[in-house]
Amino acid sequence: MAAQRAASIVSGGARAARGVTLLEMLLVVAIIAAASLLAAGTLTGGFAGIQLRSSAKEIAANLRYARAQALTKGQPQKFVIDPRAHTWRATEDRRGEIPGKLGIVFTGTRGLQARAGEGAILFFPDGASTGGRVQLQSGKAAWNVDVAWLTGEVTLKRAERLE
């Protein structure tokens, strides 16, 4: 009797449970993706925030590369940034552009300026540098790319906007 009841529950349950169609499943995945995209945009300050952080990461990576080249080659290496033109250049003819929507503030040694308005950070063969800061800004958000003068260490962190 118990076996018959168990069999009827299993077979009855199988008839009562319906599967979901592929279309329904894709619709749910699309809704979740859209909600995630909206949430990410809200939390990071939108696409401008994503662009801001991406540009700061690119600059930090190229500063680290310039330091590594100075250590490897045993020769000073220079990273130059031009806030007016929204461009930067580094060792081995590496160049890049910073989106025009972003504000740029450079703080560093004035004696290394090749031209008025440009800023430069020099890395020495022992790993040290002249030090400096590149701040990228968008709205109220900002990211600092700092280079320590004694160690040449490059750090990236969220910051308060400088005026």
Image (cartoon, grey):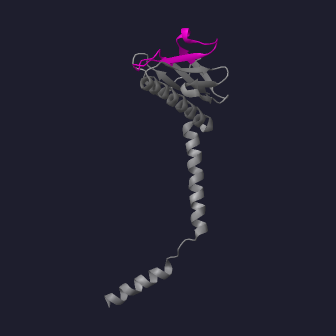
The image quadrant of residue 81 is: top right
**Closer to us: 29 or 64:** 64
Residue 152 image offset from top left, x and y in percent: 43, 21
Left or right position of 99 against 142? right
**Closer to us: 115 or 86:** 115
Residue 61 image offset from top left, x and y in percent: 50, 31
Residue 36 image offset from top left, x and y in percent: 55, 49
Q: Is residue 70 magenta?
A: no
**Residue occupying the point 54% across, 25% down:** 91
**Closer to us: 145 or 16:** 145
Outermost residue on the top side: it is: 111
Residue 126 image offset from top left, x and y in percent: 39, 19
Task: Count every numbered label the image shows and give the total.
Answer: 0
The image quadrant of residue 47 is: top right
**Residue occupying the point 63% across, 27% down:** 102
In which quadrant of the rendered image does the N terminus lie?
A: bottom left
Q: Would residue 29 be seen by someone viewing this image from the given angle?
A: yes
Please give the range of residues in magenta: 106-132
Q: Would residue 157 be seen by someone viewing this image from the given angle?
A: no
The image quadrant of residue 53 is: top right
**Residue occupying the point 54% across, 39% down:** 43
In which quadrant of the rendered image does the C terminus lie?
A: top right
Residue 123, above or below 92: above
